[in-house]
Image (spheres, helix red, strand yellow):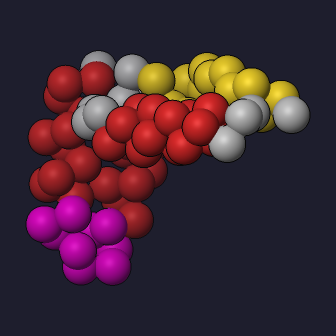
Amino acid sequence: MKIGIVTVYKSQNCGSYLQAWALKTILERLGCEVCFVPYKSTSGSIVNIIWKVLKCCIKLRFRTAIFLINRSEEVV
């Protein structure tokens, strides 16, 4: 059986890739033919980042807003 795993590449951390790799390993042990289907995250656009920060501020989630700003500095 052929299986395609969709995972986010070029993300801030490697957790999604490591999880996909572990899933691939298990599926190959079960006899499946596995390949990765690359998916580029759109969360890096400046408009999306500003929108998310504004929504966090409206909901009084300032720590989350600061986290998003710090994370976006690495992307943009």
Query: Which of the two residues, 31 or 55, is positioned nearer the viewer here?
Result: 31
Residue range in magenta is 56-64
Where residue 59 sits in the image (x, y, percent)?
33, 79
Whether residue 58 appears in magenta in the rendering, the answer is: yes
Q: Which residue is depicted at the point 39% across and 21% down?
A: 10
- Determine the main secondary structure of the stretch shown in magenta: helix
65 w.r.t. 26: above or below:
below
Q: Which residue is depicted at the point 69% across and 27% down?
A: 34
Where residue 19 sits in the image (x, y, percent)?
42, 44
Q: Is residue 12 left or right of residue 29?
A: left
Q: Which quadrant of the figure contains the N terminus?
A: top right
Q: Quadrant of residue 50?
A: top left
Whether residue 12 appears in magenta in the rendering, the answer is: no
Q: Which quadrant of the figure contains the C terminus?
A: top left
Q: Is residue 27 left or right of residue 41?
A: right
Q: Quadrant of residue 74?
A: top left
61 w.r.t. 30: above or below:
below
Q: Is residue 17 left or right of residue 8?
A: left
Q: Is residue 33 visible?
A: yes
Q: Which residue is depicted at the point 32% across and 42% down?
A: 15
